[in-house]
């Protein structure tokens, strides 16, 4: 969802993920939520991101929405990649300038410095 | 069908909007009318004052009535009225003429029941209560009495025309009601979530009752994604999560959102305390320069927040006040200090904060999504600010005022997104953003300063002192 918003940067998405620590959390699965959010995701960025985090189960091409309805196993994997994998420590890098947005304790710091505003 | 709705006597301005938002959520308006027209029909009982806790409301079905009542915070109960009158004789006549097919299903021998006698504005002894119950012998209750957990709960309510009414509004003449309870607020909710037992608090944590009211105005529900751009300690998101929504929050202050007061006293632990699902993400971000990817839009079902408008907590945005004033040029932080540098921030005026919030909501809410937020209002006579923020994408559906002091109130605004965010709107918002930046000092110094209007000594006091 996030992109680099440094002044002057035109191509700030997707942010590259630099992984230092990934944490897997248990989250109760909610089918309605997954179905609602699925069309809003940039699939390529999402599947690339999950691969960098160590999970290879997301296909490169976005699946048909009907797959979410019919394939419970896939829904579970989608849920796992979307909600259960957390980047605990690491950074998000601006694809254009290489500027690092640090991620600490699971929280990305997207605040710009004084000269980037 | 008309039901009797009895409210808790507090936050009067919030009562009907809550019921209407919930009625909408539970399908009362199937005809897809415009959001501003999704209002219910209300009627005051005879002899009652508009502030009365008693109202008749027209709801399409018992299911809707039950769902609304059980989820609400301010509805003490919704009842199917079997009869009403100015005296017990009138009541008896009314109940006797109420159709049998509406009464018999609840009087059967296989069910359990209980009768509660409630006298509003006065205390009735147990003896008097039992006397009233015996007076209902003309109703053929066939079931067994179960005081703890009955199948059906009947209520006999007396509202009297006595002088002192325990703070309730006066009733011109006595009115008595008898009905079957269809639903009512969960009385365990507020004690469970009260702030005094909350794990992680901050000075601006929203109290539990108000947080739930906000979540109800926003129609938080399972499957939805709710966002708070000023998340702080997460108090508002907690209530949305209680109603089943997934949540996400951001704050410009990294210490509040990332660190909290320790590994077990932070935003995450607040959710853990109640066994609620964690927010899907927490960010440190500036609402004035948000980090969303281009093309991202219509992602949130609701945005609920209490923006920092400078009374209890001043808002901040990126930039540094000297920088924005042009006193110093943009400086570069040396490389070795960049990692831990906390960027300087500048005061964020209310006008700009609200502009950014409306722009964010216009872009990021789904059509039909709700923006629910507090807006401060000065109560001084010379205040010329009596219209609320507007935006072409939104329709204002509710405003509820809560008086905080003799000087100011806050109003909870509920807006529904009714049209799409266009390129033109995005451009207009960007132009406005640049205008705010260029006129930074002007907005802060010349613009209406809420903080000083609340905290400076009263005008009259000053005039009196001058005369002495």
Image (spheres, coloured by chain):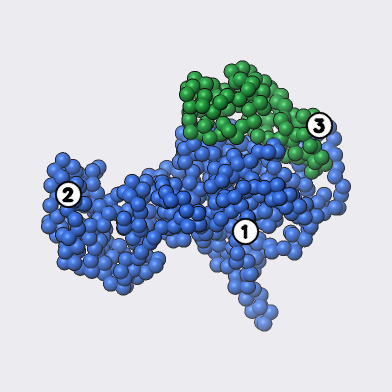
Chain colours: A green, B blue
Q: Position of residue B380 (x, y in %)?
A: 60, 70
Residue where numbered disc 1 is placed? B389
Q: Classify residue B127 as left or right of residue A99.
A: left
Task: Measure how far apart labels 2 and 1 are at the Cα level.
Answer: 52 Å
Asked which quadrant contains residue B112, the reply is top left
- In the rendered image, the quadrant that contains the N terminus of chain B is bottom left
Helix, strand or loop for disc 1? loop
Task: Measure how far apart labels 2 and 3 are at the Cα level.
Answer: 76 Å
Residue where numbered disc 2 is placed? B104
Residue where numbered disc 3 is placed? A97
Q: Position of residue B328 (x, y in %)?
A: 86, 49
Helix, strand or loop for disc 3? loop
| x 22%, y 60%: residue | B83
Q: Position of residue B352 (x, y in %)?
A: 70, 54
- In the rendered image, the quadrant that contains the C terminus of chain B is bottom right
In which chain is the residue bearing label 1?
A: B
């Amino acid at each position: 969802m996030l992109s680099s918003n440094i002044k002057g940067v035109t191509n700030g998405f997707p942010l590259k993920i630099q992984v230092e620590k990934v944490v897997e959390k248990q989250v109760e699965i909610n089918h309605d939520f997954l179905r609602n959010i699925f069309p809003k995701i940039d699939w390529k960025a999402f599947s690339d991101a999950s691969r960098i985090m160590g999970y290879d189960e997301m296909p490169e091409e976005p699946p048909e929405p009907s797959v979410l309805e019919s394939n419970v196993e896939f829904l579970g994997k989608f849920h796992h990649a979307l909600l259960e994998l957390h980047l605990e420590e690491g950074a998000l890098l601006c694809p254009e300038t290489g500027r690092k947005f640090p991620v600490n304790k699971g929280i990305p710091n997207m605040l710009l410095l004084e000269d980037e505003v | 069908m008309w039901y009797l709705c009895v409210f808790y006597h507090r936050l009067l301005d919030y009562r009907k909007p809550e019921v209407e938002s919930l009625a909408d959520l539970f399908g009362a308006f199937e005809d897809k009318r415009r959001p501003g027209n999704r209002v219910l029909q209300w009627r005051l009982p005879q002899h009652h004052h508009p502030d009365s806790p008693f109202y008749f409301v027209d709801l399409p079905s018992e299911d809707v009535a039950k769902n609304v009542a059980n989820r609400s915070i301010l509805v003490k109960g919704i009842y199917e009225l079997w009869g009403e009158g100015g005296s017990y004789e009138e009541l008896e006549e009314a109940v006797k003429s109420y159709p049998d097919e509406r009464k018999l299903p609840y009087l059967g021998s296989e069910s359990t029941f209980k009768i509660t006698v409630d006298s509003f504005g006065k205390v009735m002894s147990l003896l008097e209560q039992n006397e009233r119950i015996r007076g209902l012998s003309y109703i053929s209750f066939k079931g067994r009495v179960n005081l703890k957990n009955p199948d059906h709960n009947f209520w006999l309510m007396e509202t009297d025309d006595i002088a002192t009414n325990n703070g309730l509004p006066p009733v011109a003449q006595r009115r008595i009601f008898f009905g079957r309870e269809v639903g009512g607020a969960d009385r365990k909710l507020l004690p469970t979530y009260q702030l005094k037992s909350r794990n992680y608090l901050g000075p601006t944590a929203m109290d539990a009752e108000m947080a739930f009211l906000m979540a109800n105005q926003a129609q938080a529900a399972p499957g939805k994604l709710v966002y708070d751009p000023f998340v702080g300690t997460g108090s508002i998101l907690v209530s949305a999560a209680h109603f089943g929504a997934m949540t996400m929050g951001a704050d410009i202050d990294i210490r509040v959102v990332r660190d909290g007061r320790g590994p077990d006293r932070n935003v995450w632990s607040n959710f853990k305390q109640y066994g609620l699902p964690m927010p899907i993400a927490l960010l440190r971000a500036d609402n004035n320069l948000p980090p969303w990817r281009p093309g991202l839009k219509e992602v949130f079902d609701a945005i609920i927040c209490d923006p920092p408008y400078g009374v209890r907590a001043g808002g901040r945005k990126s930039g540094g006040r000297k920088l924005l004033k042009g006193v110093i040029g943009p400086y570069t932080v040396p490389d070795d200090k960049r990692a831990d540098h906390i960027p300087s921030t500048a005061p964020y005026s209310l006008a700009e904060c609200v502009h950014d919030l409306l722009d964010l909501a216009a872009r990021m809410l789904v059509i039909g999504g709700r923006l629910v937020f507090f807006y401060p209002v000065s109560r001084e006579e010379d205040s010329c600010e009596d219209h609320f923020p507007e935006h072409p994408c939104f329709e204002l559906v509710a405003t509820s005022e809560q008086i905080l002091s003799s000087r100011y109130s806050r109003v909870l605004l509920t807006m529904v997104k009714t049209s799409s965010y266009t390129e033109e709107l995005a451009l207009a918002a960007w132009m406005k953003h640049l205008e705010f930046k260029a006129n930074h000092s002007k907005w802060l110094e010349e613009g209406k300063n809420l903080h000083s209007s609340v905290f400076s000594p009263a005008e009259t006091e000053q005039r009196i002192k001058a005369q002495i």
